[in-house]
Image (tube, rainbow, N blue to C red):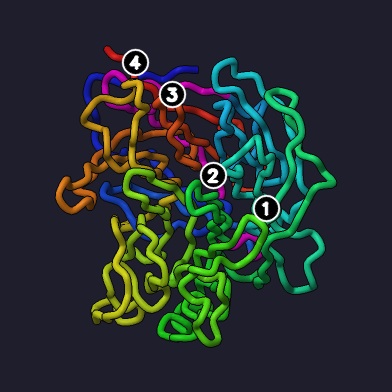
């Protein structure tokens, strides 16, 4: 099905908008728009961070000249979580229950290329996916998921490397090729597991996000603790990690010589860093991140700086103390971009739009602009970047009224913006899909 843009944009949101939560994090801060009459339905203790999805009845709205094309629906993908493009242009999509699909973005043919055994309790499952920069010459695929044999009272998250055999439609993940690169433990009662991956094309390293695994109900007991797991350099949770493609520690990591620190830590003070995106012209790594759960909290897009501390859970937004909500604390890295939660938000994807060199793609207005996806608001927004400072300005609606929350915002080789819609919380949904936004030139 194709949805096309209308001639005028209505109000940002309507009364039928319904709040939903990602399977990997409680929506926290954020939004430049106002949601009317949100509904929050939390699952039971085994999935405290999940919310039941209720389809919205609002029509999908885009700017004139744009359209949304569905490449794979729920008959192909179930509980889709993340995606990565192979060099041949095919989209490889992960499913929370462990499946990996290959979808040809031209012919729309699809096939399952493999699966991994993964724990799917609570907010766990298969999430991140990344190809080795030299794929298929170096036929390695990286996946982030959870072990099924964790010790009692723990979960074990891992990043594994697999070998892909064959090419094109004949591609398959060799089930005997698994190599574990990284593992960390967490408590099932806590929320936020992270799991985004980025195989850096020039640094030749793998970036990994981890959630802080705190319990939201106990925020007052940990928010001012300088040794909380997200702040502790000796704990892998609440971090962006940086490792070699073989699991080794890069010698230029910022904490290699720091006493008591895990040398794989690259940045800290993260709550639920949902996605990683590399912007080649600026060499920036963007992390779309869920902030706190109070109405005055913020969701964020952060530019990752080696050794930086982004403040969670001690501060939120631009240095405001989490406990008092008013005192300012220095020494933390401010968000590159933030928007207020108001009554619900969940920032899950961000990219800077860089069209192909062929000239195809979106109109000039959108070139070099920030795009970000909000799962709870079922929307994608855009903000221009200041040509002098490189920072985002005021945002505006780009897509609103999606039938389910968007995930995995990616720029395709064809100049289209690709995304996943994930309609369920702990099971497949009729709203699950892989789609793209294309410019139709009215």
Mark 1 touching mark 2, by CB under 8 A?
no
- On screen, residue 351 versus residue 93, left or right, reads left
Q: Which residues are magenta?
A: 45-71
Q: Count how many numbered circles sit on residues in the image.
A: 4
Which residue occupies 72% across, 40% down? 99
Rendering coords of residue 283 (x, y %)? 37, 50
Q: Secondary structure at mark 2?
A: loop
Residue nearest the observer in this picture, 367 or 16: 367
Residue lying furthest left: 388
- Residue 349: image tag: none
Q: Nearer the viewer, mark 1 or mark 2?
A: 1
Cα gap from disc 3 to disc 2, whole angstroms: 32 Å
Cα gap from disc 4 to disc 3, whole angstroms: 13 Å
Q: Nearer the viewer, mark 1 or mark 3?
A: 3
Q: Which residue is mark 2?
A: 53
- Could one spot residue 433 in this view of the protein? no
Q: Nearer the viewer, mark 2 or mark 4?
A: 4
Q: Is residue 48 magenta?
A: yes
- Residue 440: image tag: 4
Cα gap from disc 1 to disc 4, whole angstroms: 37 Å
Decide: few, some or many residues near mark 4? Use Cα within 10 Å; few <14, some 14-19, many ≥20. some
Residue lying furthest right: 176
Compared to 256, does 168 lie above or below?
Answer: above
Which residue occupies 43% across, 34% down? 411
Compared to 93, does 161 lie above or below?
Answer: below
Cα gap from disc 2 to disc 4, whole angstroms: 31 Å
Q: Which residue is mark 1?
A: 125
Q: Which residue is mark 3?
A: 414
Mark 2 touching mark 4, by CB under 8 A?
no
Tag 4 or tag 2, which sits nearer the N-term?
Answer: 2
Q: Secondary structure at mark 3?
A: loop
Q: Quadrant of residue 30?
A: bottom left
């Amino acid at each position: 099905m194709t949805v096309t843009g209308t001639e005028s944009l209505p109000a940002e949101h309507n009364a039928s908008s319904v709040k939903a939560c990602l399977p990997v994090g409680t929506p926290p801060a954020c939004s430049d728009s106002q949601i009317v009459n949100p509904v929050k339905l939390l699952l039971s203790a085994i999935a405290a961070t999940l919310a039941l999805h209720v389809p919205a009845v609002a029509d999908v709205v885009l700017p004139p000249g744009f359209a949304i094309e569905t490449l794979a629906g729920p008959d192909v993908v179930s509980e889709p979580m993340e995606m990565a493009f192979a060099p041949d242009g095919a989209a490889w999509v992960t499913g929370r229950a462990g499946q990996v699909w290959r979808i040809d973005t031209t012919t729309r043919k699809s096939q399952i290329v493999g699966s991994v055994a993964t724990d799917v309790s609570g907010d766990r499952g298969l999430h991140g996916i990344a190809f080795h920069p030299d794929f298929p010459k170096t036929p390695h695929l990286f996946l982030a998921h959870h072990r099924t044999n964790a010790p009692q009272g723990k979960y074990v998250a891992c990043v594994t490397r697999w070998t892909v055999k064959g090419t094109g439609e004949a591609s398959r993940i060799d089930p005997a090729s698994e190599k574990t690169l990284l593992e960390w433990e967490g408590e099932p009662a806590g929320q936020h597991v992270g799991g985004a991956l980025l195989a850096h094309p020039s640094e030749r390293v793998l970036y990994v996000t981890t959630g802080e695994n705190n319990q939201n109900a106990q925020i007052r007991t940990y928010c001012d603790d300088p040794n909380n797991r997200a702040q502790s350099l000796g704990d892998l949770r609440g971090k962006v990690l940086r490792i070699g493609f073989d699991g080794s520690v890069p010698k230029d990591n910022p904490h290699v010589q720091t006493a008591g620190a895990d040398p794989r830590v690259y940045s800290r003070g993260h709550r639920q860093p949902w996605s990683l995106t590399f912007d080649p012209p600026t060499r920036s790594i963007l992390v779309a991140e869920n902030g706190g759960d109070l109405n005055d909290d913020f969701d964020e897009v952060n530019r990752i700086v080696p050794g930086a501390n982004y403040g969670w859970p001690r501060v939120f937004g631009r240095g405001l103390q989490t406990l008092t909500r008013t005192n300012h604390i220095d020494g933390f890295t401010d968000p590159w971009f933030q928007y207020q939660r108001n009554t619900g938000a969940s920032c899950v994807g961000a990219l800077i739009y860089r069209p192909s060199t062929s000239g195809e793609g979106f109109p000039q207005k959108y070139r070099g602009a920030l795009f970000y996806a909000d799962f709870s608001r079922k929307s994608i927004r855009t903000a221009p970047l200041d040509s002098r400072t490189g920072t985002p300005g005021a945002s505006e609606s780009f897509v609103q009224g999606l039938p389910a929350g968007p995930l995995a915002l990616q720029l395709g080789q064809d100049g289209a913006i690709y995304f996943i819609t994930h309609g369920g919380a702990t099971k497949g949904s009729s709203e699950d899909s892989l789609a793209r936004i294309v410019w139709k030139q009215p």
